Image (tube, rainbow, N blue to C red):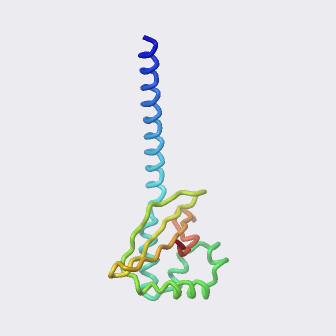
Amino acid sequence: MDGALVKEIGTKALLIGAGSLLLFWTINAVKLVISARGINPLVKKFFNQIAAGRIDAAYLLTTKTYRQHVSRQDFLKFLSGLQLNRYRNLKSGRPRIQDQEIILTLKLKSEDKKNELPLDFTFTKVDESWRIDRIAKVTS
């Protein structure tokens, strides 16, 4: 009889633990989705500005902190080094939350899908709207 009691308690503890983990994961997933609203339109606007040749408009989608650390000339050099005209497709990864920022890996793919350029974008909320705070080429 004692073995059955231990087994029953163990099963209940395991179910409670699994339920708690599922609840924790669900809450964090919902929190991430709600907090990330507005990032996809910003990314689209950023790349549309660059494609249209409006580099200054794309530069202004970054935070003041970014612009203090990365001059317009450095931004132009960075963009030209990426050779963005070689890429046509954009695939967004899973966002990660880190200290009130959201980090999103975007993969630019060539039309033939043979070449891929992964970029890490860090987004920060400034006055209720998202801004780009960092752009970095992901090194493998």
Quadrant that contains the N terminus: top left
Q: As displayed, is residue 102 above or below residue 81?
A: above
Q: As displayed, is residue 131 above or below residue 21?
A: below
Measured from the top left, where is residue 124 in percent x and y? 56, 64
Measured from the top left, where is residue 126 in percent x and y? 57, 65
Question: Residue lying furthest top in this view?
Answer: 1
Q: Is residue 110 left or right of residue 24?
A: left
Foreground: 125 or 81?
A: 81
Q: Is residue 57 left or right of residue 91?
A: right
Q: Is residue 51 left or right of residue 125?
A: left
Measured from the top left, where is residue 109 in percent x and y? 39, 77
- What residue do we see at 43% from left, 21% from top? 7
- Number of marks: 0
Question: Residue lying furthest right in this view?
Answer: 68
Q: Is residue 122 left or right of residue 109?
A: right
Question: Residue lying furthest left in this view?
Answer: 112
Foreground: 83 or 63?
A: 83
- What residue do we see at 48% from left, 48% from top? 28
Q: As displayed, is residue 12 above or below residue 85?
A: above
- What residue do we see at 53% from left, 63% from top? 103
Measured from the top left, where is residue 79 in percent x and y? 52, 84
Foreground: 7 or 21?
A: 7
- What residue do we see at 55% from left, 63% from top? 125
